[in-house]
Image: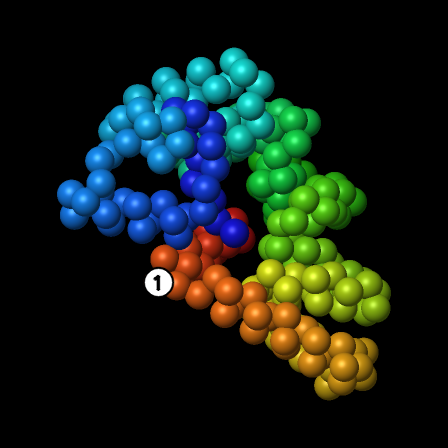
Amino acid sequence: MITVYQPCCGKVFCYGCALAETKEMDKGNIKGLCSFCRVPLARTDKERMKQCKKRLKLNEAESFYTLGSKYREGNWGLSKDMSKAIELWNKAADLGSVSAHHSLGVAYSIGDGVKKNVLQTIHYMKLAAMGGHEMARYQLGMIEKDYCNTERAMKHLMIAAQSEEKKSLKEIGEGYKAGHVTKEEYANALRAYKDSCDEMKSGQREAAKLHRHVQDHRSR
């Protein structure tokens, strides 16, 4: 799930909810206040940076992860600096950020700011997957598939499918055709995927998924 970090108070909530809230603010239906701490939302990059730096002093994992991502993207008025991003993500990972584990896994998989390293990729993807990161779970499945560890690959992909990861469902379907997945396992995966989609379906959720696809494309 794509999330939004609030540097004013350090809270994290889903992108779909944030999008819905922003639309209501634009309509004038609600005030431009943080949903959690009720302070006015930052209007400029300078204000956001100031708030984030205060959270850094509290050793808050998501503040380090967020600032690292801004360095990677060159946002908040910062110059792109992947070395700085890696440094901040490592700090965030040490503090338990699941998103940081995933971002480090991606960096090691493509050699972005670090040398390509399969073992490091697997290490960080496993940590992220154990923390509930569905994309990391999918990527672990694909890594296992590339190494012909089909049984482990299918297990990872079936878990990812339960979190509305459509690409995992497609891979499970291919596994079923090849005889690596039973009819019952495939049916269970389809059912779990559908239940997840039904539970989370909304206009905001679709916008969040689009945002995720953009982010995934940027990380390639």
Q: Indicate the position of residue 156 as horizontal and vertical percent values.
A: 74, 61
> Compared with residue 173, is residue 127 higher up or lower down, i.e. above or below?
above
Provide the residue designation for mark 1. 203
Left or right: 48 in relation to 84: left
Q: Quadrant of residue 119?
A: top right
Q: Indicate the position of residue 12 as horizontal and vertical percent values.
A: 48, 37
Which residue lies at the image location 81% right of the left edge and 78% below the top edge? Answer: 180
Q: Indicate the position of residue 132 as horizontal and vertical percent values.
A: 65, 49
Left or right: 156 in relation to 57: right
Q: How many marks?
A: 1
Which residue lies at the image location 68% right of the left edge and 27% below the top edge? Answer: 94
Q: Pick the residue in front: 162 or 86.
A: 162
Label 1 environment density (alpha carbons within 10 Å; few <14, some 14–19, many ≥20): few
> Compared with residue 113, is residue 201 higher up or lower down, i.e. above or below?
below
> Compared with residue 69, is residue 8 higher up or lower down, i.e. above or below?
above
Left or right: 69 in relation to 175: left
Q: Pick the residue in front: 50 or 8.
A: 8
Task: Name the amino acid, label 1.
Answer: Gly
> Compared with residue 172, is residue 213 higher up or lower down, i.e. above or below?
above
Which residue lies at the image location 56% right of the left edge and 66% below the top edge? Answer: 196
Which residue lies at the image location 52% right of the left edge and 52% below the top edge? Answer: 1
